[in-house]
Image (tube, rainbow, N blue to C red):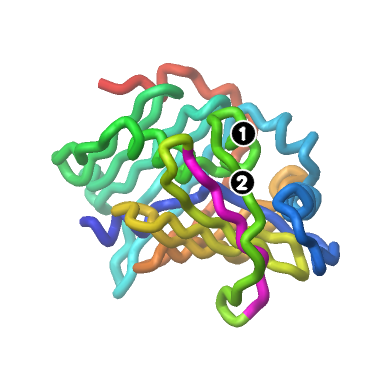
Amino acid sequence: MKKLAIALLLISSVCMTTTINAQNLSTAEDVLNAYYKAIGGKKALLNIKDLSWKGASGGNGASFPAVGTYKVPFKQVITSSTPQGQVVYKFICDGKDATMLIGSNKVPMSRAVMDRYILTLQMMPELCLADRGVKTTFAGKESVEGKEAYKLTHTMPDGSTWHTYYDTQTGLKVKLYVPGQSVGEINLYADYRDVNGIKLPFVLYPGTGTLKIESYQLNTGISDDEFVIK
């Protein structure tokens, strides 16, 4: 079940591409601006008030229905179930607090770990990092799946860090790496497609297995009742 849970995560954050050339950038601000431009423009991204997707996760021939729902600011629910409908993984955040279940077992989280999950499991955390006291710095270039990418380091108020990577040719986010995070530690993003003028990834590779998105919906008026922690 842990592998299945890892295979879900997402979406964080999420997104990108056009034919822009994002080469030879040297600051975190420039890399993020190229990313926003690649996926539809920062103004259009800020107009997204809620987002949902449905798909399937798995590997080795197994397939588990999965759904994700997000609402500004920070509300989110990610769920995966067996084909028979039994929930095997669920992460829910009401905007302030979060709970993670693997099967029927609640995963213990300190406040610092919870705050990190709330951000790293977002579809587009880049838009709200500064609001949560996260410092983002440029960390050079690295190869991701054989292609050159810019590396950004994000530092939480407690000093913990994670990294995101953006293709130098397209501006696309191609990788998320959260050292030591038990769920969603590594995620690769691929198969970006246009959804109402925004580029979103339809395939994610979270270290084990694959999450394939079947469809996205934007700004459908999702109720706050969807994010109540029980």
Quadrant of the rendering where the N terminus is positioned:
bottom left
Q: Residues within 10 Å of mark 1 (few under 14, many from 20)?
A: few
In the image, 81: left or right of 189? Answer: left
Residue 144 higher or lower than 100, as above or below: below
Q: Residue at x 55, y 31 (%)?
A: 133
**Residue 179, horizontal then vertical, whole percent:** 39, 58
Chain part drawn in magenta: 147-156
Overall secondary structure of the magenta section: strand
Residue to which mark 1 is pinned: 130
Query: Residue 148 at x, y = what percent?
Result: 67, 75
Quarter-wise, where is residue 31 in the image? Answer: bottom right
Q: Secondary structure at mark 2?
A: strand
Residue beneath label 2, please? Answer: 136
Give amino acid for label 2. Answer: Thr
Q: Is residue 54 above or below residue 46?
A: below
Residue at 29 percent of width and 53 percent of height: 182
Taking the view exactly as shown, the residue that stands out farthest to the front is 159
| Residue at position x 41%, y 17% in the image | 225
Relative to 28, 229 lies left or right: left
Q: Are marks 1 and 2 in contact (CB under 8 Å)?
A: yes
